[in-house]
Image: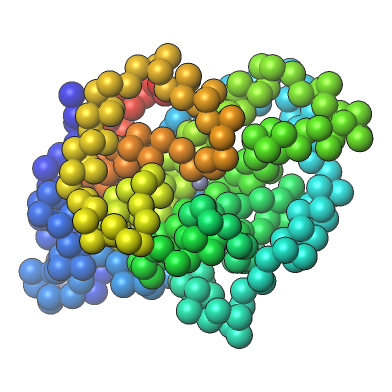
Amino acid sequence: MSETPDAVTIACRFCAANNRVPIARALEDLAKVRCGSCSSGLLRVNGEPLTDITDEALSHPWDHEALDKLKSIPMADTIINKLLGSTLDKLQRFDLMANGVCLGPKQVPRVWKLYLEAAGRVDVDPPPLFLVQDPRMNAFTMGAGLPQVGVTTALVETLDDRSLLGVLGHELTHVRLGHVTYRTLVWLLMIGAIKLLDLFDLARLVIKPIQIALFRWYQMSELSADRGELVTTGSLETFVKTHMLLAGGTSKIIDELDVAAFVDQANEAERLRDSDLLLWAMELFRNNSRTHPLAVWRVHHGLKWARTPAFFEVLAGKTQGILGRAPHRTSNETTAP
Ligand SMILES: [Zn+2]
Ligand SMILES: [Zn+2]
């Protein structure tokens, strides 16, 4: 049972007039939500930097919950920090430097410009961005102390600028929220690089409870980064389209893919979900190379958040806020699956 209201009241940041905004209609095109008094756009969806955005607004409660569980395991932090020393940072930076293209104002400036826009939207200093040759659509953020973001050639080829902007905002939200270290460890476990760490005689320290808690948190951290993705583009359609393409898209069939049908699929998958199934799927993904799995689950939760006043509060600006009820959580969101 949802507690989400049908409408929010937004005070215009230009003339301070209060506007009652029906949520469902606003979500059709957030750029068209205008002040009834001065006609200015009420929501900041045209690329302007959001310097007042907070970690609290972006973090999904299940992300905190899973991280708390991980941190409550005795010695977890010590073991993880031992696994991820500065040597690993240097190794990763060298790997990307040696095998990818470092983007910048003169190197693929179109993508670089999108990257800077995304960084402004989630208010984070952009770390180095690399383009790597890979036939799979993917984006990733790595590093123990020094974050670095990567996108694959297939991703840049397949996504349009709006979707690419959203994916970059997603990765930069991982950076902003300090997800990078733990995500790097998950990635190392996934690709079997812990064998490499045998060299440091540390593999034996990776105990099962930490692995399970890490993989669980990894999934939950996606829900937070997806919030950043939604905020970056301010478009629900772009969000769904991006995740549909990541789940099963190629540039050849892009015009035949249907956003509404994918939303129905996401809601249907949510009905099928139960905790055991999700945990099983999470366990399974360790054995393949998907770094952003469970697309439909994430679409469902991303859209659910976009229907709450919390999303509108981020886009409307913090100072004038949303007036009236603002339940940031819905009743079935208090316990993670
Ligand atoms: Zn106004
Ligand atoms: Zn992610």
Q: Is residue 58 something that shows in the picture?
A: no
**Residue, x 50% and y 33% (percent of image)?**
219
Q: Is residue 228 left or right of residue 91?
A: left
Residue 218 to residue 165: above or below: above
Q: Is residue 161 left or right of residue 101?
A: left
**Residue, x 53% and y 75% (percent of image)?**
112
The answer to which image quadrant residue 153 occupies is bottom right
Image coordinates of residue 46 in percent, x first then y, are 31, 72
Of 192 and 292, the residue lying toward us: 192
Of 144 and 88, the residue lying toward us: 88
Q: Is residue 303 left or right of residue 229?
A: left
**Residue, x 30% and y 67% (percent of image)?**
45
**Residue, x 41% and y 35% (percent of image)?**
294
Image coordinates of residue 69 in percent, x first then y, are 58, 22
The answer to which image quadrant residue 334 occupies is top left
Q: Residue furthest top?
A: 276
Q: Is residue 50 left or right of residue 95?
A: left
